[in-house]
Amino acid sequence: MSDVKIRKLTTRDIDAVMKIDEKITGKPQEAYWAGKIASYLSREPEACLAAEIDGKVVGFILGDIRGWEYTIPLCGWIDIMGVDISYQGKGIGKMLVESLFDFFRKNGVETVVTVVNWNDGDLIDYFHTHGFKRGEYINLVKKLN
């Protein structure tokens, strides 16, 4: 495998990110998703990273620094990440996470938060390998139908 380059994500990468996410989830992404990525890029561009091999985006991570949600003190957030299925298991996700951690550390962040579906055991296990533990918050849901 060629060298992996971790770099800042740009608006030119939005289509590649959407394609990676579609491969992972099996669902085509809507225009809303492109707008959400653009929003992250405008808020905290240094926390939005791409993994690139031979000029092709093969992974991404979107994060930011915020603290107002859920009365949590200022912390780093991983909103979403993905690695193209063909490149998973090669350490690319780890490179993305560690690069984002470096950004957070340089900006005085001491805690990183992410939200994972309770039923997504593989993703929970993945974040456990990076030192994440269950936090003190749970979400409550009410269906309105």
Image (cartoon, rainbow, N blue to C red):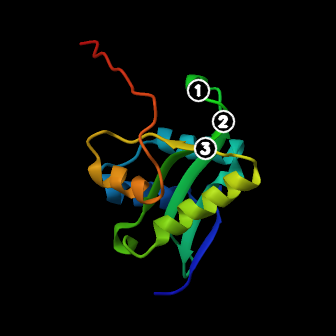
Mark 3: which secondary structure?
loop
Q: Mark 1, mark 3: which one is toward the viewer? A: 3
Would you name the residue on which mark 1 appears?
69
Three-letter amino acid code of the residue under disc 1: Glu
The quadrant the C terminus occupies is: top left
Residue 12 visible somewhere in the drawing = no
First of labels 1, 3 by sequence position = 1
Q: Residue at x 56, y 41 (%)?
A: 35
Q: Position of residue 32 (x, y in %)?
A: 49, 38
Closest to the observer, 14 or 120: 120
Three-letter amino acid code of the residue under disc 2: Arg
Mark 2: which secondary structure?
strand
Residue furthest to the bottom = 1
Q: Position of residue 97 (x, y in %)?
A: 54, 60
* Contact, mark 1 vs mark 3 (Cβ under 8 Å): no
Would you name the residue on which mark 2 appears?
66
Above or below, comparing residue 76 to residue 60 in the picture: above
Q: Residue at x 41, y 40 (%)?
A: 134
Residue 100 visible somewhere in the drawing = yes
Spatial CA distance of label 1 from label 3 is 14 Å
Q: Residues within 10 Å of mark 1 (few under 14, many from 20)?
A: few
Q: Position of residue 81 (x, y in %)?
A: 48, 54
Spatial CA distance of label 2 from label 1 is 7 Å
Would you name the residue on which mark 3 appears?
111
Closest to the observer, 78 or 12: 78
